[in-house]
Image (spheres, helix red, strand yellow):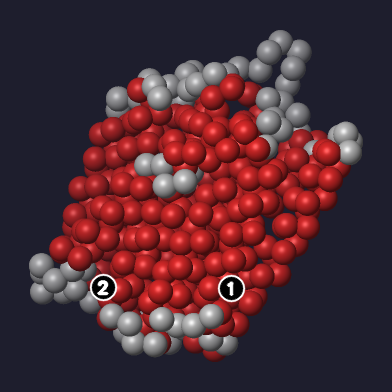
Amino acid sequence: MNRNVVLLALSQALAMTVVSLMLSASALVSVGLLAAPGWATLPLAVQYLATMLALHPLARLMARRGRRPVFVGAALVGAAGLALAVAGLLRGSFAVFVLSGLCVGVLGAVSQFYRFAAAEAVPTAQRSQAISLTLAGGVLAAFLGPFIARTTRDLAGTPFLASFAVLVGVALLAAGLGLFLRLPVPPRPEAGRAPRPLGQIARQGDFRLAVAGAAVGYAAMGLLMTATPLAMLCVRHDFDSTVTVIQWHLVAMFAPSFVTGLLIGRLGVLQVMSLGGALVLAGIGVALAGDAIAHFSGALVLVGVGWNFLYVGATTLLTQTCRDEEKPTVQAFNDSVVFLSVTLATLGAGPLVDRLGWATVNLLVVVPVALLMAGLLRALRRRRAGLAPAA
C-alpha cells in the first residue's frame, strides 16, 4: 500500500458513505415528499443517469489535466448537489430532491475512476491488489453511512434533513483528500503508436467479457439493493432493520476486497468472476426462501460478495485489454455501459416491486446472471484447452 492507494481508498470510503445513505434513505425521503406511487426510486435513477453521462467528459478532462484536479472538482460538485438536497427537504419539494441527484451523480462518476488511478499508481503485478484495496474503502462507508442515518435522521424537524447536511461535509472532505494525491502524469502515446479505435479493442473476447461482467454484476446488485428497502417496507419491517440490512450488504460488497486481489492472483480472474456469479444466484435463492429480516440480510450479503468478485475481476480483466494511451476511452466506455444498466435497473426497481412483487424481481435477475455465467464457463474451457480468448 502506497500513499496514493491509501488516499484513494479513503476517497472511496467517503464517496460510498454518500451512496450508502442515499440507498438507505432516498426512497423513504421520496415517499415523505409525496412521490407518485412507483417513483420512489427516481432520485437514485437520476443520480445513476448523471453518473453515466458524466463519465466520458470526466475521462477526457483527466486525459488533458490529470486525475487530481478532476477528483477535487467533482467532489465539490457533489457537495453542491447534497446542499441542493437539503434545500429540497426544507421546501418539501420532490422535484428539487430529484434534481440534486444530477450533481451527486458527478461525485459517483469520479469515484469510478479511483480504482483505475490506484492501478496506475503501482507496478503491473500489484494492480489487482491496488484495485481491491481501493474498493475496500467501502467497508468504512458501510458503517459510517448507516451511523449518520441513525444518529441524524430526527435531529432536525424534517426527517433526514440533518443527514444530508452532514453529507455536504463528507463530500467536502473528499475534495480535501484529493489535494494530497500525487498521481502519475497521463501517458502520451508512443511515437508511431496511436490509440486503437474502440471498435478494434472491443473485438477482443476478454474485453467483451469484462464489460459484461461489470455491467451484469452491478445491475443485478443495484436492482436487488434498491428494491430491498421497498420490499421490506411492504412487509412492515422498520427503518432501523432496513438500515442494518443495507449496512451488512455494503460490508459484504467491500470487505472481500482485502483478499479478492490475492484470490485473482492464486485462482485466476475468470475463476473468481465465476464464483461471484454463483454467489449472486445463491443470494437470489435465499431471497426467494422468505421475507424475514434474516432472508433479506442473507440474500444481500451473498449478492454483495458476488458483486465484489465480479466487479474486481472484471476491472482487472479490462486493464489487460488496452494500452496506456487507450485507458481513458476504454474506462469511460466500460463505466458508461455499467451505469446505463444500473440506471435502468434502479429506475425499474420501484415499479417492478410495486407491480410484480419481490419474488418476481429476484427471478428476473436470474436470466442475465445465468447468461454471464455461461460466457465465463465457455471462456474458462477455452483457456484450459489452450485456445486464445474468443475474438
Q: Which residue is mark 1?
A: 285
Going by the image, does 311 lie left or right of 254? Answer: right
Q: Tell which of 273 and 197 is nearer to you.
A: 273
The amino acid beneath tag 1 is: Gly
The amino acid beneath tag 2 is: Asp
Percent x, y of residue 229 = 39, 75
Going by the image, does 307 lie left or right of 107? Answer: right
Percent x, y of residue 192 = 76, 13
Q: Residues within 10 Å of mark 2 (few under 14, many from 20)?
A: few
Q: Which residue is mark 2?
A: 240
Q: Secondary structure at mark 2?
A: helix
Q: Answer above or below: position of 141 versus 283.
A: above
Q: Tell which of 340 and 211 is nearer to you.
A: 211
Which residue is rendered at x = 28% and y = 54% of the image? 143
Which residue is rendered at x = 54% and y = 35% of the image? 261
Q: How many marks?
A: 2
Percent x, y of residue 260 = 53, 40
Quadrant, the C terminus: top right
Percent x, y of residue 383 = 82, 38
Label 2 vs 1, first from the N-terminus: 2
